[in-house]
Amino acid sequence: MRRLLGSRTAALARKEVIHILRDPRSLIIIFILPLIMMMIFGYAIDMDLKNIRLGALDHDRSPSSRAFLEKLHASPNFEITRRLVRRDEIKTMILSRSIRAAVVLPEGFGESIRQEILTPIQVIVDGADANSANIIINFLQAYIADYSLSLSTVHLQPLEVRVRMLYNPGMKSANFVVPGLVAVFLMMVCAMLTSVTIAREKETGTLEQILVSPIRKHEVIIGKVLPYVVLSFLIGSVILGFSYFWFKVPFRGSVLLLASLSLFYIFTALAFGLLISTVSPNQQMAMVISLVSTILPVIMLSGFIFPLASMPRVLQWVSYVIPARYFLLVIRGIMLKGTEIGTAWPWILPLMGLAAWFLLIAARRFKLKL
């Protein structure tokens, strides 16, 4: 029985591979289009930021240092979410994205202010997002300059900011944008690939041949998805290779880990495309639905361009069902920060849940009858 089941699934998968190979022009477009779009978006996208999460390490613990941090927390652009005790907590908090930057006040901070001595303040910023890091630095420098002027002593020297950039010392915006584009293009291409599979069978009239054969619902779905898993993985590899060799995006993590976790994202996107194909009457409608339901939500609601913390609460809730929201953290973390599996699990589990959800709905909607 298992042998028969395997042969039916393999036969359907083989049929799907033949469909792919018989349309080489579409295959070329599928590989070339993401690279062209990456060139355009990689050089053109700009971003903004607000509601920045900060960590505070206060070595002085004086009334002056507490007043400085309280005023910083009360400002509209910052929110101190972590009060740190040890210096080694900073990297851990930034790596897990609990904070975007850390402010370190030295011992003798309050005494230096009273004696009108130049007082250094260290700011450690997550440089994986070059654009956001620049904004954070500019905001902090403006705040510190304003705080210096607000002090009562007329001749007090301004406080000094000493910045240390983590993960992206050169402040290259492409290092942040390009990994995000990988998530956008994979979602778009994968959903589009599988969205036309069942719709094509309906449109060409070959669905009847499948329905009269002794094949089961799950075998149809598996047979349809498997060839596109391999094809999507190849497309993702090409896009990643292009980002590494053309844009010189660093790759500090494990290639094997990223490849393994990318399969979860690819499977989620393919399952979503399969769901679209079950409700689409023809290929044209399937492609339109897949493009509209992937490009706009992924770009607007995943955190790729617009920070989620700046959005209305309703849109933040909607973003939890956008698979790219989680994969963006995975790919940027692995490529730019060298994130390991222990840190990435909180982002992978939602992807697995979304993949199972999309696949379950697609299986329930697919009917083995006309």
Image: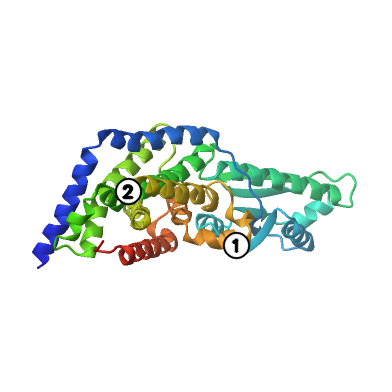
Q: Amino acid at mark 2?
A: Val
Whether tag 2 and tag 1 are in contact, CB under 8 A, the answer is no
Residue pictured at 25% horizontal, 54% vertical: 224
Query: Considering the numbered disc 1 on the image, is that residue within a helix, a strand or a loop?
Result: helix
Residue pictured at 53% horizontal, 56% vertical: 97
| 309 versus 183 height, above or below | below
Is residue 23 visible from the viewing direction of this image? yes
Is residue 254 visible from the viewing direction of this image? no
Task: Give the crowd class for mark 1: few <14, some 14-19, many >=20 residues within 10 Å.
Answer: few
Query: Considering the numbered disc 2 on the image, is that residue within a helix, a strand or a loop?
Result: loop
Which residue position holds label 2? 196
Question: Is residue 70 or residue 331 the one in the foreground?
Answer: 331
Image quadrant containing the N terminus:
bottom left
Residue 105 percent location from the top left of the image: 69, 55
Task: Give the crowd class for mark 2: few <14, some 14-19, many >=20 residues within 10 Å.
Answer: many
Question: Is residue 91 or residue 43 the one in the foreground?
Answer: 43
Residue 10 percent location from the top left of the image: 15, 54
State the scheme by which the image is colored. rainbow
Callout count: 2
Image quadrant containing the C terminus:
bottom left
Which residue position holds label 1? 314
Specify which label sits upstream in the sequence, 2 or 1. 2
Residue 354 percent location from the top left of the image: 40, 62
Q: Amino acid at mark 1?
A: Val
Q: In screen coordinates, is 113 left or right of 223?
A: right
Question: Is residue 80 or residue 297 the one in the foreground?
Answer: 297
| 168 versus 355 height, above or below | above
Residue pictured at 60% horizontal, 62% vertical: 314
Residue 73 percent location from the top left of the image: 72, 59
Instruction: Say which mark, if any, is on residue 347.
Output: none
